[in-house]
Image (cartoon, rainbow, N blue to C red):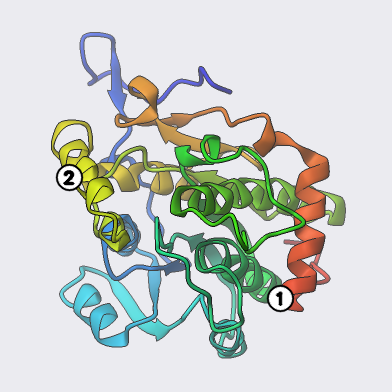
Amino acid sequence: MDNADSTIGSSKGTSTGKVKWDFGRIPDLSGRTAVVTGANSGIGRVAAVELARAGAHVVFAVRDLERGRAAAAGVSGSTEVRRLDLADLASVREFAEGWDGPLDLLVNNAGVMLLPERRTRDGFEMQFGTNHLGHFALTNLLLPYITDRVVTVSSGAHRMGDGFIHFENLNLDGIYAPQRAYSQSKLANLLFTLELQRRLTESGSRVRSLAAHPGWAATNLQSHTTNPVTRALMAVGNKVVAQDDKGGALPTLFAATQDLPGASYVGPSGPMEMRGAPTLVGRSAAASDVAAAERLWEASEGLTGVVFPVVSAAR
């Protein structure tokens, strides 16, 4: 899937007769409902805004309601703001318990990056707990309502770090490093996507599980790191390499709205997948390990107390 075409054929295209996929290619989403986690800023807000603009009713699922309302203010389309703290499983359960009615699309976008060592409210390493376990619990709790697809935002950083999940030490006690923890959480996102699709297929569900990554997008996610050297390097990268949050949101929107097979992974088509039009991209061998995906799922069920639900084959 590394060489999939990132353009849509058109008689009004460039000299090659094709038009790069962008916001104007999003189909009419009238009558559909979407939840976007972390929709208060960055690529999450862009994705939420564009889904609403295309006609969907979009729920901004955010930790800070005031910031969420500010992000949703003035958006063209139907929106609402609900509180969700992915670093607190009680908050995840409260959000899911408050849901009623069909949910066409869940975008697992929220995340933290390169933090100093700290824990979630439930005692998990913060990056793994927020980026993976919070979304794992949310997805499974909402799955009985989901009718179309789940899109989980990963990162090219899944190839970095140690290149595997520390199953015997998921909190990275004694070996914590911000990059190691972030890479593990992003690898977990891809393994989650893979195993979720396997379970959906096995259950006969038509719901699809997909993943996307933004390339290098200049957003406030990078401001979470307290390392001055890392911050300086990212500032340079943001000016020289990065695309803006709109470009970074395109892979998410492509995965959310295009007819793609389950377990697809979407990223930018440019050099090193840093920027460019969205296309299907490859993943590391570790992110394709079905045994590790199943093991991670079982570990995540044990840690969160949330299990794969009975899913109707009609969905």
Q: Amino acid at mark 2?
A: Ala
The residue where tag 1 is placed is 304
Q: Amino acid at mark 1?
A: Thr
Under circle 1, the secondary element is helix
The quarter of the displayed image where residue 305 is located? bottom right
Q: Residue furthest right?
A: 202
Left/right of residue 133 with respect to residue 62 in the rendered view: right
Return the disc, 1 or 2, that comes first in the chain's sequence. 2
Q: Residue at x 73, y 65 (%)?
A: 300
Q: Residues within 10 Å of mark 2 (few under 14, many from 20)?
A: some
Under circle 2, the secondary element is helix
Up-down: is 309 above or below 50?
below
> In front of the other: label 1 or label 2?
2
Q: Nearer the viewer, residue 174 or 17?
A: 174
x and y, in percent, of residue 291 in the image: 83, 42
x and y, in percent, of residue 271 in the image: 34, 20
Real-space CA distance between mark 1 and mark 2, rounded to the nearest whole angstrom:
36 Å
Q: Residue at x 22, y 31 (%)?
A: 241
x and y, in percent, of residue 221 in the image: 31, 58
The residue where tag 2 is placed is 235
Up-down: is 246 above or below 205?
above
Left/right of residue 194 with respect to residue 275 in the rendered view: right
In the rendered image, the quadrant that contains the C terminus is: bottom right
Q: Residue at x 31, y 39 (%)?
A: 216
x and y, in percent, of residue 127 in the image: 50, 62
In the rendered image, the quadrant that contains the N terminus is: top right
Q: Nearer the viewer, residue 194 or 253?
A: 194
Q: Nearer the viewer, residue 173 or 252?
A: 173
Left/right of residue 291 with respect to residue 107 in the rendered view: right
